[in-house]
Image: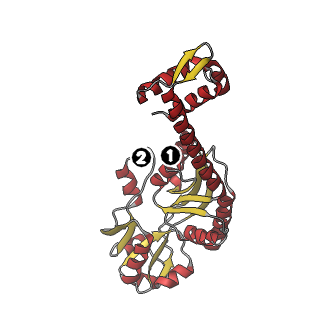
Amino acid sequence: MNILHMKYAVEVARLGSLNKAAEALLIAQPNISRSIKELEADLGITIFTRSAKGMVLTPEGEEFITYAKSILKQIDEVEGYYRQASHKKQTFSISVPRACYISDAFANFSKHITEEPAEIFYKETNSQRTINNVLNNDYKLGIIRYAENYDKYFKSMLDEKGLSYELVSEFSYLLIMSAKNPLSSKEEITFDDLSPYIEIAHADPYVPSMPLSKVVKEELPDNIDRRIFIFERASQFDLLSENPDTFMWVSPASQKILDRYGLVQRKCVDNKKIYKDVLIYKSTYKLSALDKSFITALCESKRKYLK
């Protein structure tokens, strides 16, 4: 049974005329007539009979209209309740790369959430899933990360999909490792120095319009024979802390995180690649007060950790 057809029937019963109901509802009269016939066929009853006075309810029709009014009233009450609740509730959602400075910004942002009801979503993932989350999964904001040499691929794809984008930061990856790792005492670390060690890496690189095999080859070069692939940041810190033979390429981490896990952060003299973190959202989306609050926290965190 179609709820819309039920609404049409109630309006016809109220006005006693198909034409008057059509004018009130701003719908063509034949559409209302057809809808009522379909409703009667679905229910197996006759709701109206035609007379010189217009559309007259049958006994079954009177009973149905009583039920229909009650049902439509309940629907209106439910819609009104959730519209009001949605209006009052604070909402924020963002999909981001796994990065210490971004999680630090989110933690500071969370301190400014007011006492009003709130739903906050924070998801760490790769750039492909972030783009999909913003386009299809109702995440309002996203931050994607990619190497500077892929800039044209990403910007072309973002333009094509109707996404606005703003540069958040540019940086080179640093190395983090246990303070007990032999490399931690070296003044200069090279790519060759890393080859005997185990790399902790995220297993989901992505560049639009490029084969995954080519992206993997560029992002995960073959000078390392041993890698552990993970998807979750807490695991990476545990591994780095407990196994002094491991290392990882990361955006600059805070001293607080390094101290917590007994890690050190070092530069690699051979690493010249620049990465970009880019804020994205639908071009039709208007930033909320919470969005702007997070962006402010993000800028403050960037200034502290990406010098």
Q: Is residue 78 visible?
A: yes
Front-most of 85 and 302? 85
- Residue, disc 1: 153
> For residue 126, what is the image quadrant?
bottom left
The amino acid at mark 1 is Tyr
Image coordinates of residue 137 in percent, x first then y, are 49, 50
In the image, residue 86 sits, relative to residue 102, either above or below, namely above
Q: Residue at x 48, y 22 (%)?
A: 37
The furthest residue to the top: 52
Q: Is there CB contact under 8 Å for labels 1 and 2?
A: yes
> For residue 70, what is the image quadrant?
top right
The amino acid at mark 2 is Met
In the image, residue 251 sits, relative to residue 87, either above or below, namely below
Q: Can you say which quadrant of the picture contains the C terminus?
A: bottom right
Image coordinates of residue 164 in percent, x first then y, are 61, 47
* Left or right for 251, reference 177: right
Residue density around tag 2, few if under 14, some if 14–19, many if 20 or more, within 10 Å? few
- Residue, disc 2: 210
In the image, residue 209 sits, relative to residue 247, either above or below, namely above
> How many numbered circles does the render carry?
2
Residue density around tag 1, few if under 14, some if 14–19, many if 20 or more, within 10 Å? some
Please tell me which of labels 1 and 2 falls first in the chain.
Answer: 1
Image coordinates of residue 74 in percent, x first then y, are 56, 46
Q: Is residue 307 visible?
A: no
Disc 1 on helix, strand or loop?
A: helix
Disc 2 on helix, strand or loop?
A: loop
Image coordinates of residue 174 in percent, x first then y, are 50, 71
The furthest residue to the left: 225
Q: Which mark is residue 275?
A: none
Q: Can you say which quadrant of the picture contains the N terminus?
A: top left
